Amino acid sequence: MAGRDEQKMTTPAATKLKSTKRLPKGWRWVRLKDVAQINPRRPADLQRADEAPTSFVPMEAVDEVTGRITKQITRPFGEIKQGYTYFAEGDVLFAKITPCMQNGKHAIARGLIGGFGFGTTEFHVLRPSPAVTSEWIHYFVRQPALLLKATEHFTGAVGQQRLPADYLARLQLPLPPVADQKRIVAILNEQMAAVERARRAAEKQLETIQALPSALVRRAFMGEL
C-alpha cells in the first residue's frame, strides 16, 4: 500500500515534501482521498419527519479560533433536507470560501441529532476511513501554512473564490498508526486547551485595560481623584 502511494506522488509539491521531511518508523505518506471520502453522497434512504428537529450548521456557528461548532442550531428537517450540505457524526467540515477558509472555520461535526445534519453549501465534507481519526484530519487541515498555500488554488471570481475539492483530495498527509494518532491528538488537545485558557485570560486583561480610561474620567467627575 505504502509503495503504491509513493509511486503515485508525481506533483512537484508532493515530491519536495517527501524529500525534505522524514517520517518516524511506522508512519507513511498518503493522499487525503486515500484515507477519507471527499464530499460523500447523502444516503438515498435518509428519511425523517419533516417537522423533526435536525442539526444545522451555518458558517457563523463555527468558531474560527478554536475550530469548533460553538452554536447548537436546529431546524425542521423539511426546511433543510434539500439545498444544503449533508454530513454525518464525526465528519470534518472544511470551509471552502474565502476568507472563511483562511480564517480557520473548519470543525468536526459532533453531537448531531440522530447522527447526521446539514449545513451551508460552503463546506467541503471530509469523512475519515478506519485508518485515520477525525481529529488527525482536523488538526492537519487547520495548519496556517497549509491554508496559506491553499489560497494559490482558489477558483472563481474575486470576492467569491473557493477552494476546489480536488485540491483537498490530492493533499499529502503523514499517517501514523491509529494508536499513535490518538496519543498525539490527546497531547495536542491538552496543549491547545492551555493555549485557549491563556488567550481568554489575556483578552480579559485587555478588556480591563481598555475600560480604565472611561473609569478614570468617571471618577474625576465624581470628585474621587
Image (spheres, helix red, strand yellow):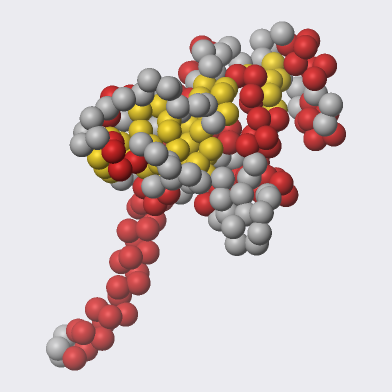
Q: In this view, does 137 lie above or below 3?
A: below
The residue at 20%/36% (across/down) is 51
* Quarter of the image where the N terminus is located: top right
Nearer to me, 60 or 149? 60
Indicate the quadrant containing the C terminus: top left, top right, bottom left or bottom right: bottom left
Total numbered labels: 0
Is residue 185 visible to the viewer in this orientation of the structure?
A: no
Kindly identify the residue that appears in the image at 56 percent across and 50 percent down.
97
Q: x, y (%) of residue 64?
A: 46, 49
Residue 141 seen: yes
In-front residue for pair 29/22: 29
> Where is residue 35 shown, x and y percent of the image?
60, 19
Along the viewing direction, whichever of 98 and 77 lies nearer the viewer: 77
Residue 6 placement: quadrant: top right
| Residue 192 as seen in the image, left or right of residue 129 | left
Left or right of 148, for residue 205: left
Quadrant assignment, res 115: top left
Residue at the image position 45 percent from the left and 27 percent from the top? 42
Residue 174, horizontal then vertical, whole percent: 66, 23
Residue at (35, 28) in percent of width and height: 116
**Is 105 in front, or is 43?**
43
Q: Is residue 169 shown above or below 119?
A: above
Percent from the top left, x then y, of residue 62? 40, 46
